[in-house]
Amino acid sequence: MAMTPEQFLTQVKLGRLLPVYLFLGPDGYKRDKCRRALIEYWLAEGEEREQGLTRLDLDDTTLADAMDDAMSYSLFSTKRVIWITSAEVALPRGKDTEGAAEPVVRFLKNPPPGVMVILQCSRFEFDNEDKAKVERVQKFYSCVVAQVEFPHPTPLEARALAQLLARDSGLRLAPDAMELLIEATGANATRISIELEKLGLLTGEGGAVTMEQVQKMVPDARESTIFALVAAMGRRDRKTALEVLDTLVREGEYLPLALSFLAGQFRMAITAKEARLAGAAQIQQYFSRQGVPMWKARAEQVAQTAQAFTLGQMQAAVQGLFKADRGLRDIRPDDRTVMEQLILALTAAG
């Protein structure tokens, strides 16, 4: 039975807990929230909590030994939580893994009263090439009926979380600072929480957080300057594009990355134009249905590009981007010259 973290928290609140749960997925923010709620409910604060929580890692022990520990009675605590990480390590080689977690099956036949086991598998994503790996883990632990899934949040979910945490911390983020924070953290919920805490220490409660402060405090935020270049070129803002290029060159950024983002934006704008999508809302809805990550600010950039260029101009721009990318990778005197020529061409009038 696949469960959301919210459903697990409801079970904790109601006290309707099963003896074994599989925590599956990479999102550490919600997983830590569930862990804290479980431990606070199941183990009384103080000595019971200190003695009753056992952490085991299958990189250091076997699944059989870990489950033997869970089945043994403790002299120091009547309640226990056995938290087993790296649960995916127990999978055997080969494709047939269904129902193979025999030590867990033995535990479930007669679980000791007061003992809960959490099997944590956090190495794999739920999509792309990791999808098959996740399915193998699910089959291996198919005896565990409660499997709680912790996928990384979508950009929209990450933005909602950032807004909630900022409001709870009394922070006021400018819209461009919020977008930069989401981009720089890769929509990672744990990183968003940590960076907002740092920004709160910088500005104090009720402080306004600017884009410059995010660039200064958040690791990798500088990379999002590339998005500023992409946005400026996409709306034919020559002056801003040249200024951002100057910043990128001085900071030694990898310029082919900017071309890659820009080419992606033009391709999405071409699709939007051909599908006759009117406005950012339709663009966001259309690409989200296709399984392409798309959030409001990104959709607005695509809409600006589609409005600023004709279909023929965008198709020519994609060809120009290909030539510029090839030029950047050739032996040449100056990357900046190649990029300046591209900016001048793409931001030319009409």
Image (spheres, rainbow, N blue to C red):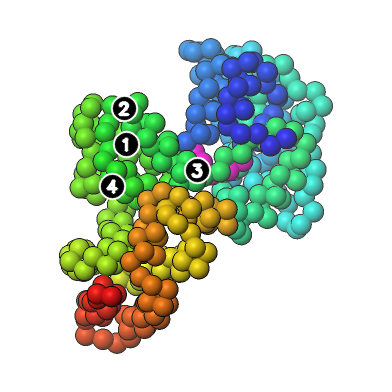
Mark 3, secondary structure of its residue:
loop
Residue that badge 1 annotates:
196
Q: Are marks 2 and 3 in contact (CB under 8 Å)?
A: no
Residue that badge 4 annotates:
176
| Residue drawn 34% across the image and 47% down it | 179
Q: Is residue 175 left or right of residue 76?
A: left
* Amino acid at dot 1: Leu
Q: CA distance from mark 2 to mark 3?
A: 21 Å
Q: CA distance from mark 3 to mark 1?
A: 17 Å
Residue that badge 2 annotates:
169
Q: CA distance from mark 1 to mark 2?
A: 8 Å
Residue that badge 3 annotates:
153
Q: Is residue 195 visible?
A: yes
Q: CA distance from mark 2 to mark 4?
A: 19 Å
Q: Are marks 2 and 4 in contact (CB under 8 Å)?
A: no
Q: CA distance from mark 1 to mark 4?
A: 15 Å
Q: Between residue 110 and residue 160, name the one nearer to us.
A: 160
Image quadrant in which the N terminus is located: top right
Give the percent coordinates (x, y) of residue 69: 67, 28
